[in-house]
Amino acid sequence: MRKGIIDRFEREVAVVEFENGIEDFPLTQLPKGVQAGDVLLFESGKITIDSEGKKQLEHEIVDLMDELFKD
């Protein structure tokens, strides 16, 4: 299983960031309603949105920002 994060959209393509690089995917191959920042799971030829993975990532970002901006 691979896990990637949608970095951005360029026309009809989603730019997905993986641990080892970046790949482009046509929007037609991705689940409907994907957004920048969504975490995607790639497994057995299927691509799904990992809602829990996105929540965890958002939590980690908030924690890092809190640490960075401490008084």
Image (cartoon, grey):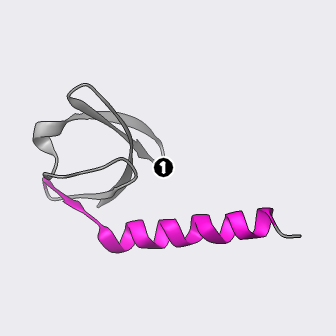
Q: Is residue 7 left or right of residue 58?
A: left
Q: Position of residue 4 (x, y in %)?
A: 37, 52
Q: Position of residue 22 (x, y in %)?
A: 41, 36
- The overriding secondary structure of the stretch rendered in magenta is helix
Three-letter amino acid code of the residue under disc 1: Glu
The magenta segment is 45-69
Residue located at (54% from left, 72% from top): 59
Give the secondary structure at mark 1: loop
Q: Position of residue 65 (x, y in %)?
A: 69, 63
**In the rendered image, which quarter contains the C terminus?**
bottom right
Residue displayed at 40% across by 52% down? 37
Residue found farthest to the top: 11
Packing grade of label 1 (10 A; few <14, some 14-19, many >=20) is few
Say if 61 sits above or below 15 in the image: below
Residue 20 sits above or below residue 33 on the image: above
Residue 61 % position (x, y)? 59, 64
In the foreground, 52 or 3: 52
Quadrant assignment for the N terminus: bottom left
55 with respect to 70 (left or right)? left
Q: What residue is shown at x 29% (from left), y 66% (from top)?
A: 50
Residue that label 1 marks: 19
Q: Is 66 in the magenta?
A: yes
Q: Is residue 2 highlighted in magenta?
A: no
Q: Is residue 25 above or below residue 32?
A: above
Image quadrant assignment for residue 66: bottom right
